[in-house]
Image: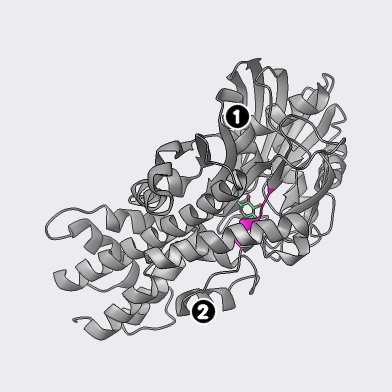
Amino acid sequence: MAFNEGNFQDIMSEFAATPEFIREVATNFQKDLKIGLRDPKSSSMRMLKSYVGLPTGKETGEFLALDFGGTNVRVLRIKLEGEGRYEVVKKVGEPLIIPGKYDYIGKNSTVDEMFGFLARLIDEAIEGDHETKFYLGHTFSFPSTQDDLNNAKLIIWTKEFATPGVEGKVVNDLLLDALKKRGIENVVPVAVINDTVAVLLSAAYKQSEVYTGSIYATGHNTCYLESSIKDPKGFGQGGMILNLECGNFMKLTPNRFDIELDKNSEKPGEQRFEKMVSGRYMGELFNMAVAELLDEIGKNYGFTSIDMSGIVEDDTANLEKAAAIVAEKTGHKLELADLKKIKELDAAIIIRSARLVTASYVGIVWQRAGEGAITTQHVAVDGSVYEKMPLVQENINKALRELLGADADKVDTILDNGGSGLGAAIAAAMAVS
Ligand code: GLC
């Protein structure tokens, strides 16, 4: 079959992120930040206080780190040695879901299963030692309200998590219950942070001039150091880190695929920005558009962002690898002209994502600069989309240049791989110092 050219062009224009569009998004993002600083309820972002500022880099000691925020849970024992140095003494990890085997994040899972699973992993990480005292930092990567560093109440699940009985609860209370049930009383949670905060702490532990931390993976979110907020209950220096929960940013126009995806998601109306840019959803957007081109609207081929990477990085003349992925998922053997279109569409979705995410970073850079000049700074980013998806980093750089002009020389993004675990250990160290 040959795709309908008009339909293809229409889909491509839906996913275009023009220079005007991203500039508008950056401007609206900054406006929403300003509004949120005055009154968080008026912003589409939650702008949650984390009760922690930046580390000094001198934090030392051994800590337990629980990294809970995606399908893979990790527990690490990390020895902080100061000046950016650290050693991972022990690391265990397992998925919360293995399709067909077990599922601790779906609608039918329970609090006991989910937190019992976490307690079991912690037990493994401490190698059954129920005597030695371990301080635990918990990276809990969902929107949570805090009124100190150690208590976080889950507002709402995101990223399609659906376990009943956790929303509205203080997560470390649930964790403590589960630990107790396993006879573990020597693990003491002392800090809960979002994964974006963890990335920022981790990057700032190692180098200076980092004020923004971001996750660009299954989910998407960013935090930054807000120097105007000082709170006696907070730890660290330079002000307070705000977890923006900008996956929920809404002041931008979605296209018809975004609208449809949102309608069919676990939480319609929530996380509109995240549903346009993050790894969890890009495959679905691609899926919907491909189904339209194949005249099979509504069909689910199960495309993931990994498939999208595979297709877009195929540089062979006949697009053989791309053809194989498309055939495997859709059952269609496409002619070369159509495959080229699929690849173009794939790239357009990735590029839109990278450009929108960059617009949000620029909104933060502008907000931090205020009336003053933009200073040299690195935006620390962790996540598979940022790290591994083709086209992402080059399009971030391009969009930074487009939006910041000459100031783009002062702003770059840096990978902080594994920051979620290290950041939790640093937060724990800051809490007990
Ligand atoms: C979702 C969560 C947020 C987290 C992000 C990345 O957006 O709501 O808390 O930081 O995913 O994991």
Please give left or right for residue 406 compared with residue 122 in the image: left
Is residue 420 visible in the rendered image? The answer is no
Residue drawn 45% across the image and 62% down it: 22
Q: Position of residue 411 (x, y in %)?
A: 46, 40
Foreground of the two, 56 or 24: 24
Q: Secondary structure at mark 1?
A: helix
Task: Give the position of the C terminus as an image quadrant.
Answer: top right
The span shown in magenta is: 243-247
Colouring: one colour
Q: Position of residue 135 (x, y in %)?
A: 79, 26
Amino acid type, label 1: Ala
Q: Image check: 214 left or right of 185?
A: left
Badge 2 marks a residue whose secondary structure is: helix
* Magenta stretch holds residue 244: yes
Residue 260: mark in rendering = 2
Q: x, y (%) of residue 156?
A: 74, 61
The answer to whether residue 254 is above or below residue 6 is above
Mark 2 neighbour class, 10 Å CA radius: few under 14, some 14 to 19, many 20 or more: some
Residue displayed at 37% across by 59% down: 351
- Nearest the camera: 238 or 112? 238
Dot 2 amino acid type: Glu
Residue pointed to by mark 1:
204
Magenta residue check for 299: no
Residue visible at 13% across and 60% down in the picture: 318
The image quadrant of residue 20 is bottom left
Locate residue 51 relative to residue 24 in the image: left or right.
right
The reply, left or right, for residue 242 in relation to residue 351 is: right
